[in-house]
Amino acid sequence: MNNQIKIEKKIHSFKKQIIVPGDKSLSIRWVLFSSLATGISKAENLLLSEDVIAAVNAIKKLGIRVNIKNKICKIYGRGIEGYKFKKNIIIDAKNSGTLGRLILGILIKTPYPIKLIGDQSLSKRDFKRVTDPLSKFGAKFELKNGNNLPLKILGIKKPSPILYEEKRGSAQCKSSVIFAAMKTKGRTIIKAKKSRNHTELLSQYLKLPVKVKKNKKFDLIEVNRVKKISPLNYKIPSDISSGSFFIVLTALIKNSELIIKNVNINPSRIGIITILKKMGVKIFFEKQRIYKGEKIANIRVIGPKQLKPINCPSNLNAGAIDEFLVIFLVAAKAKGISYFKDLSELNQKESPRLKWGSKILNLMGVKTKTTSDSIKIYGNPNLEVNKEIVIKDYLKDHRVFMTSVIASLAFGGKWTIHDKDSIKTSFPSFLKIINDIKK
Ligand code: S3P
């Protein structure tokens, strides 16, 4: 019972400054890179959420020492080939697609089979998308139903380099192959549809043999074997995906203004900013700077008087892939019909999010038309919700929970939202920040 929350009151307009926790993609990548480095790496502001803790536990199982004290995390890397492989290792990726998929690339040479498991949501997700390219290196896999977790990987002593075309715009697939290629003698070439490029940027900062040629729609990435990785001291910047819930809340509440400090605004992550600007929201990047290859800024958002609908260009999809649920709330309040297309990947997330996005809007009384890869949202600038809404059975998808909270605060109604604990996967302090904004 107490794992649900009830919200029955709209939020008043606000003017606030907030800090959201460290970036999840960068936190998991830092853990993985540091586990392969030679020496001690140190992180400040590592996101201490369940997904990242799962990454820490995974490398511990592989013989890597980790110490977390006073919000500083130290990882004692034993070199690129330094994992201690044993028989019967089981790695639990919990809810994290990023961990589950990236670590498989790193395990490309495991001499004993390793079992990879995950929670109910992760066990429904597609792993063939990574085991297919990793099989080309020579590793062997056994997957449940040929597609899912639990799976078993048996590595190969001398993997062969591959040519790989990543067509989905999945950074997880791309990164998994990059990690495998780092352990492979010879040149692996990846032609990757645009997606977040943190793995490439960290590799380049670490001066690893990873070259990227950028084209308009795809990147050509060349990876050669890595002999040594230097320790990586890193201050993880804040996560724009976590910030997005508050950016949208500000956009939906007239006369509100928000500053979110020290956010990673990597161009491959700011699709939501481009989309919301097109919809009439005023957003500014202030104090822009570069930190170890990543762009950082304070984000200032000003809630507009009126929101415009959008026919969203699909080249913005990959850069906003984790933000569509909240973007749909903005479309619900826009004056006219918004259209989002080529979004089949959205149904491949922690829950089928295209379906859930539409379902939340329908429960609020907003008309939508969805197909397997698109949604039309019939917006209404005067939208008010006056009924009871219950959100449950959504595979504990953290972003469904947080989106529902934002919807309840912005549009009113009597909401009961189940599975509050879902926020622990990516954003444990979400409700605390909501309360700070309400004060
Ligand atoms: C992530 C990539 C994206 C994103 C996920 C994090 C990453 O997934 O949805 O939350 O850190 O690489 P896909 O690569 O499956 O699109």
Image (spheres, grey):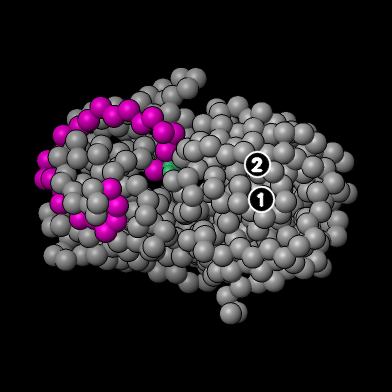
**Which residue is at 25% across, 27% downward?**
163
Question: Residue tagged by mark 1?
Answer: 362
Q: Position of residue 249 (x, y in %)?
A: 74, 52
Sequence order check: which comes first, mark 1 or mark 2?
1
As helix, strand or loop, the secondary structure at mark 2 comes to strand
> As drawn, is 388 to the left or to the right of 318?
right
**90 or 422, which lies in front?**
422
- The amino acid type, in three-letter code, at marker 2 is Thr
| Image quarter of the N terminus | bottom right
**Up-down relation of residue 252 to residue 184 (above or below):** below
Residue bounds of the magenta highlight: 147-172
**305 or 271, which lies in front?**
305
Q: Position of residue 250 (x, y in %)?
A: 77, 50
**Up-down relation of residue 368 to residue 164 (above or below):** below
- Crowd tier of the residue under label 1, counting other residues whose Cα lies within 10 Å: few below 14, some 14–19, many 20 or above: some
Q: Position of residue 279 (x, y in %)?
A: 74, 34
- Crowd tier of the residue under label 2, counting other residues whose Cα lies within 10 Å: few below 14, some 14–19, many 20 or above: some
> As drawn, is 164 to the left or to the right of 202?
left
Tell me if I can see residue 201 in this picture: no
Q: CA distance from mark 1 to mark 2?
A: 7 Å
The circle drawn on residue 368 is: 2
> As drawn, is 384 to the left or to the right of 294?
right
Q: Is mark 1 within 8 Å of ligand 1?
A: no
In the rendered structure, are the residues bearing label 1 and label 2 in contact, judged by CB atoms less than 8 Å apart? yes
**Which residue is at 61% across, 47% downward?**
358
**Residue 157 forms part of the magenta stretch:** yes
The circle drawn on residue 262 is: none
| Image quarter of the C terminus | bottom right
**397 or 106, which lies in front?**
397
Furthest-bottom residue in view? 1
